[in-house]
Amino acid sequence: MTRQQLALLMNGDADPLLVISSASTSELQALTDALFRDLDTSHPVFGAQVWYDLALEELENRNNGASPQADDLADSDAFGAA
């Protein structure tokens, strides 16, 4: 995901919680990676920290089986590989 794609997603009308909770685990991992890379720049996209925190929380919930999407992780290892 490019910085421009990330900015478009984050600045759209979509609710971050809805976007994050409805993403597949692989999509969520890609989003989390893109957010981390953006936060590592001198001028991250406004709101990136909030999105990153929400995404990490959702990944943790899925890993602990506390999310409806947790079944996505059952088919992959700790690094998301099948």
Image (cartoon, grey):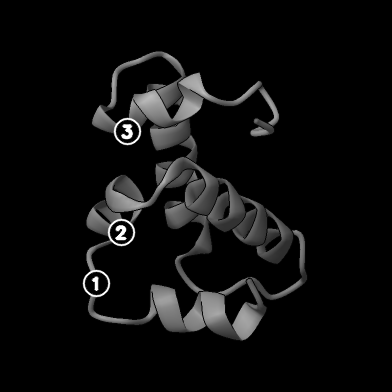
Q: Which residue is mark 1?
A: 14
Relative to 4, say whether 20 is above or below: above
Tell me: 57 left or right of 44: left
Where residue 18 sits: x, y (%)? Answer: 23, 55
Image quadrant for the N terminus?
Answer: bottom right
Task: Indicate the amino acid at tag 1.
Answer: Ala
> 10 Å neighbourhood of mark 1: few (<14), some, or many (≥20)?
few
CB of mark 1 within 8 Å of CB of mark 2?
A: yes
Tell me: 20 left or right of 79: left
- Secondary structure found at label 1: loop
Tell me: 60 left or right of 77: left
Name the residue rendered at 23%, 79% in the picture: 13
Name the residue rendered at 76%, 59% in the picture: 40
Q: Disc 2 or disc 3, which is closer to the eye? A: 3
**Mark 2 or mark 1, which is nearer the start of the sequence?**
1
CB of mark 3 within 8 Å of CB of mark 1?
A: no
Task: Indicate the amino acid at tag 3.
Answer: Gln
Image quadrant for the C terminus?
Answer: top right
Q: Which residue is mark 2?
A: 19
Relative to 35, say whether 12 is above or below: below
CA distance separating discs 3 and 1: 19 Å
Tell me: 36 left or right of 13: right
Closer to the camera, 50 or 26? 26
CA distance separating discs 1 and 2: 7 Å
- Circle on res. 66: none
Relative to 17, say whether 65 is above or below: above
- Secondary structure found at label 2: helix
> 10 Å neighbourhood of mark 2: few (<14), some, or many (≥20)?
some
Q: Which residue is mark 3?
A: 69
Where residue 12 sits: x, y (%)? Answer: 32, 82
**Mark 1 or mark 3, which is nearer the start of the sequence?**
1
